[in-house]
Amino acid sequence: MSDPIDREAPSGNPTEQMLSYWINLVDTLLTTRVNESLAEHGLTRAQWQLMNTLTARPQTTEELSQSLAPAAATTEEGPRTVEEHLDELVESGWLVAEGGMYTLTSTGRTSGERVAAVVEELRAEITEGLDDGQYQRVVQALKTMARNLGWEHA
């Protein structure tokens, strides 16, 4: 049975699969690679996202909850709360909680910088072979498709 959204039926050749096939494959491979890379540094994707948010300024749990992408909060074991992720980062010495505000510690900043370098290398590996224009066109096309499907964020 073919996917009704894709423009052409597959030929049976795996390199000629439809759009939904490639989107799902890239999403799965990307998620797996990012999660494995972050796990090597003792972080979940949500924790990495929270640390990145805190590089700008100290924030409350509520502010951090709003900045966390829904997919990042889910683990293999199921959804976890922002508070659980923050507690682990505090326990690891990467964050400190004072007066309802979370702040990166110097250890957290240093560790975050090391992980950021690893993530940047991973991004370069993932986008190897694409020039900036090609990358921007892919991202723009996916944004357009998301809006066409009802996504309202600009």
Image (tube, rainbow, N blue to C red):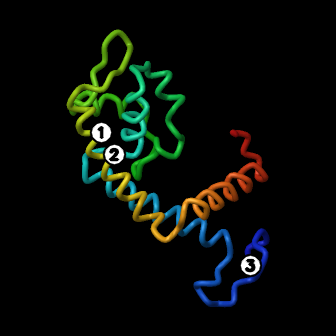
Q: Quadrant of residue 95?
A: top left
Q: Secondary structure at mark 2?
A: helix
Kind of residue at badge 1: Gly
Kind of residue at badge 3: Ser
Q: Nearer the viewer, residue 33 or 75?
A: 33
Q: Compared with residue 45, is residue 30 higher up or lower down, i.e. above or below?
A: below
Q: Secondary structure at mark 1?
A: helix
Q: Nearer the viewer, residue 124 or 71?
A: 124
Label 1, label 3: how many angstroms apart (C-alpha)? Answer: 44 Å
Q: Position of residue 73 (x, y in %)?
A: 46, 41
Label 1 Cα crowd, 10 Å radius (few <14 / some 14-19 / many 20+): some
Label 3, label 2: how many angstroms apart (C-alpha)? Answer: 40 Å
Which residue has dot 3 on it?
Answer: 2
Q: Which mark is residue 112?
A: 1
| Of pointers 3 and 2, the one earlier in the residue sequence | 3
Q: Quadrant of the N terminus?
A: bottom right
Q: Position of residue 121 (x, y in %)?
A: 35, 57
